[in-house]
Image (tube, rainbow, N blue to C red):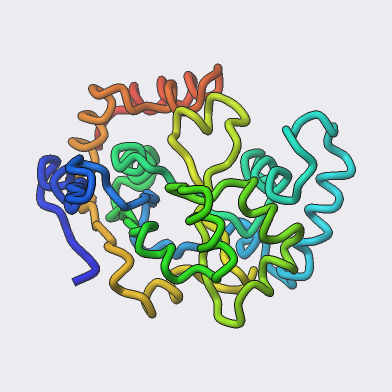
Amino acid sequence: MNEITISSFSDLVEKLFDKSWDPKIKRFRSHYVFRGLSDESYQLKTTLMRLGGNYAEMEKHLLRNFRKFAHRDVVPQDSIWNWLSLAEHHSLPTRLLDWTFSPLIAAHFATCDVEKFNVNGAIWCVDFIANRELLPTKLKSLLKKEGGFALTVEMLNKAAKSLDEFDALSRSKFVAFFEPPSLDERIVNQHALFSVMSNPRALLDDWLKKHPFLYRKIIIPASLKWEIRDKLDKANITERVLFPGLDGLSSWLKRHYTPSF
């Protein structure tokens, strides 16, 4: 089964770290990446999709104007992948989705919205190592040559200088996971990476359902959210750490002092 409903905090931890043992290196190194959602009914929609209208046609205009008006020294190198990472990081609608290597950080995002404590949350878990076998030949060759664990913006830039070139790497739809540059402490602290699909209209949910061996979806019952939330706070998995600065501090304090229902 791809959907698993947990029964306790310890059950959540067990399910999140399931299949972490890597016999090749004899270490506990999970092949999964994670995305936490406060409502299990939410789809894996990008911010570009949520823009509505003819959003796919707006993508190039959004990025062109972001590059035009932003300071040139805000990216380490003038590549579309650096600009796209920066744009996503600053809430511009893009075709990227945020993920994390950390299962507990994903659990944070599934339980940080107290207004959603009356509905089940979810954590999507995707085997990004297995997904590498579904990448276009050019991207697989770069990973093999570099000996990389995950794609980087430098690798993507070698394979495709533009999103049109990226989309043309394969006739079939595919998804690539890549690590963004360490733009600031937020990306570092969230142990972040992005997914990008080869078509701005492609919904990752639909693609994953055609490749069920790649993913699990862990359902967090609404009745467990307060317990999980409090235990994550005790483990210092909070907005104060994940969003360094006064905004993160304020978000953490507001939630921390919200009375339970």
- Residue 223 in view (yes/no): no
Counting from the top left corner in percent of width and height, residue 165 is at 73, 67
The N terminus, quarter of image: bottom left
> Who's the residue at 49% across and 29% down the image?
188
Residue positioned most to the right: 68
Counting from the top left corner in percent of width and height, residue 5 is at 17, 59
In this orientation, which residue lies closer to the viewer: 213 or 1?
213
The C terminus, quarter of image: top left
Counting from the top left corner in percent of width and height, residue 63 is at 79, 53
Residue positioned most to the front: 145
Q: Is residue 138 left or right of residue 243?
A: right
Q: Quadrant of residue 158?
A: bottom right
Q: Is residue 119 left or right of residue 62?
A: left
Residue 224 vertical placement versus 43 (above, below): above
Question: Count of labels shown?
Answer: 0
Residue 171 vertical placement versus 66 (above, below): below
Q: Is residue 203 left or right of residue 113?
A: right
- Residue 226 in view (yes/no): yes
> Who's the residue at 50% across and 27% down the image?
243
Counting from the top left corner in percent of width and height, residue 21 is at 17, 47
> Who's the residue at 41% across and 43% down the image?
100
> Who's the residue at 55% across and 81% down the image?
172
In this orientation, which residue lies closer to the viewer: 215 or 220?
215
